[in-house]
Image (cartoon, rainbow, N blue to C red):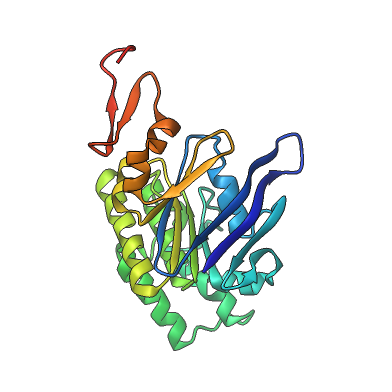
Amino acid sequence: MLDLRSLAVGYRNTRGVVLSDIDLSAAAGDFVCILGRNGSGKSTLMRTIAGLQASLGGTASLDGEDIASMRPATRARRIGVVLTERAFNPSLNVEDVIALARQPFTGWQGGLADKDRAAIADAIEVTGVEPFLRRFFSDLSDGERQRVMIARALAQTPRLLVLDEITAFLDLPSRVEIMALLRAQARDQGQIVLLSSHDLDLSLQLSDGVWLLDGSGGFSVGTPDALSRSGAVGRAFDTDAIRFSPSDGRFEIRTSRSA
């Protein structure tokens, strides 16, 4: 169980609190999409949940343990993270990058046991990265790199997966494939998957639940259908140019400014 209690996220500078009074939870097997416009706080929230950024108040706990208080090695075993930043030594090939996911389990010696190799092999098969295992990570396209980073996170066999805008560099068929893969991963492996995305239509189709940030420090939580029909999605995203249709469950281009 992921449990957020009175959580406040933001920055200890002039930006201050971005989101506060967050009381949310997610259970094993949940595939949750975090949606909101640019600047609404999605990345800040996800980095705080992952333990990469200190909270401004409250707690985020995983299976009853405060994530911020976890030892780094413990956190690395339990939480897999894929962010938009991807910095690796250019001399590493794809197989090396994925194998690094097992470092929290192998210690400084780095020797892979059978269970480590099995986890790596499963992640490679599930994500379909085998064709470029021997290539250097730095030589891959943006879409290929993103797929490798997802494979690395899966090879880590975490309890919680935190994925920030991971579909941004993928074409439409790949976005559908990866999001369906992650939903199946959550259900089959009993993992909690948190995914932020600007792919709103696809997120509303595939997620079990949505954490919707409205851009003014507020948020709504529920199933995609419930949030769509309540008007919460429209209130968060409607502009003069587009509107969300609750009946159709998708965004439409307005035919005129007065539409």
- Quadrant of residue 192 in the image? bottom left
**In the image, residue 241 above or below residue 216:** above
Does any portion of residue 136 appear in the rendered image? Answer: no
| Image spot of residue 152 (x, y percent) | 45, 65
Q: Is residue 182 left or right of residue 105?
A: left
**In the image, residue 197 above or below residue 98:** above
Residue drawn at (49%, 71%), measured in percent from left and top? 158
Residue drawn at (68%, 70%), measured in percent from left and top? 70
- Quadrant of residue 59 in the image? bottom right
- Quadrant of residue 246 in the image? top left
Give the position of the C terminus as an image quadrant.
top left
Q: Is residue 108 left or right of residue 32?
A: right
Residue drawn at (75%, 34%), measured in percent from left and top? 14
Residue drawn at (55%, 72%), measured in percent from left and top? 78
**Residue closer to the observer: 113 or 227:** 227
Does any portion of residue 229 appear in the rendered image? Answer: yes
Q: Residue furthest front?
A: 230
Q: Residue furthest right?
A: 13
| Image spot of residue 15 (x, y percent) | 70, 35
| Image spot of residue 76 (x, y percent) | 59, 70
Q: Residue furthest bottom?
A: 114
**Residue closer to the observer: 50 or 153:** 50
| Image spot of residue 69 (x, y percent) | 71, 68
Q: How many numbered marks are there?
A: 0
**Residue closer to the observer: 85 or 178:** 178
Q: Is residue 18 left or right of residue 120?
A: right
